[in-house]
Image: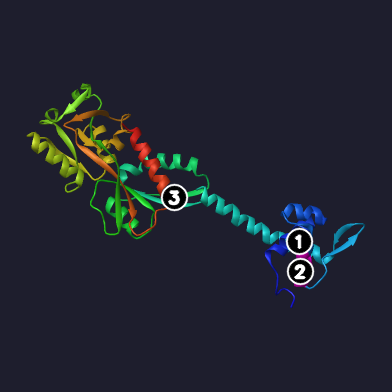
Amino acid sequence: MAGSELSIRQVEAFRALMASRTVTRAAHALGVSQPAVSRLLADFEASVGFALFERKHGRLWPTGQAHALHAEVERAFSGFDRVVQAAAQIREQRRGAICVAAAPEFAADFLPRVAAAFAHEHAGVDISLLTLGAAQALERVAAQRCDLAIVGETVSTCGVRLERLGQWPMRGIVPRGHPLARKRALNAAHCEGEAFVSFATGTPERVRIDRLFAECGVTRRTGVEADYAQAVVTLVEAGMGIALIDPVTAAVAGARVAVKRFEPALEVAVMVARNERQETAPLADAFARHAAAALARLR
């Protein structure tokens, strides 16, 4: 029955003959012998059930039916070529999509910069950036609704694997024009009796900062607090007090407030979160490497 023995190799031989019009050139293009091309063409004609070529003056001339069939073959092969191209793009990480969630202290400036550097090396990859609280970001990763999340040091959520990207000391920030802005570095004693802008009660940052000052025996005047580091910077800029913030936020806060080294050092970790059941994706690995490199430059 016509069509019952059709094979991709027969179609390739037909396509090569349509392009070259000689068995010799078609055989060379396919890397096979001339008899093999002739046999493939004969089998193809038997499969489709009609003649495809007429021989005139030593050359093969396609019939009208061959032209009609060739148009369909080219459409099919263009789709196949797109599959091959897509596979190459995926292999070379130039195609696909990645969704990254981040806590607000990383999402405002740091994450877009990492995404831009990543995009330059992975043209064609769609990138989605989400700003979420740390708990929400981990929940998205656990539910496989995003590929990874960048958060501060936190307790892992069920189904999430945390990996430390690096650890850096927090920075002191002071309003410009404040007497402490003239100091090369700040220490806990400098904060005695000073108005202090705190993170919200119960947040990991607040707990660690309060513990540090308690251990140093320093009393601050805490009256204003905020959930996120960017809000803390704005409050300090407005003259509401001094503060300690993470180094990622501090790296871009220098145009608004005076940023100072602080002693004793209060180290904070930056973590990347992945779904522990999901196989590691090359694009997610590449994005995490870009994030780690950007964090290393903060030093």
Instruction: Provide the secondary structure element on which disc 2 rests.
Output: helix
What whole-number distance in Å separates the C-alpha atoms at marks 3 and 1? 42 Å
The secondary structure that most of the magenta stretch takes on is: helix
Find the magenta span and give its range.
39-48
Was residue 40 drawn as part of the magenta stretch in this picture? Answer: yes
Badge 1 marks a residue whose secondary structure is: helix
Disc 2 and disc 1 in contact, CB within 8 angstroms = no
Q: Residue at x 52, y 52 (%)?
A: 90
Which x, y percent locates residue 21?
A: 83, 56
Q: Which mark is residue 36?
A: 1
Say which residue label 2 marks: 43
Q: Residue at x 83, y 55 (%)?
A: 22
- For residue 68, which quarter of the picture? bottom right
Q: Which residue is mark 3?
A: 282
Is 65 included in the stretch rendered in magenta?
Answer: no
Which residue extends farthest right?
57
Residue 217: percent from left, percent from top: 7, 34
Q: CA distance from mark 3 to mark 2?
A: 44 Å
Question: x%, y% of residue 108?
Answer: 35, 42
For the residue pair 270 and 262, the one nearer the viewer reads as 270
Q: Secondary structure at mark 3?
A: helix
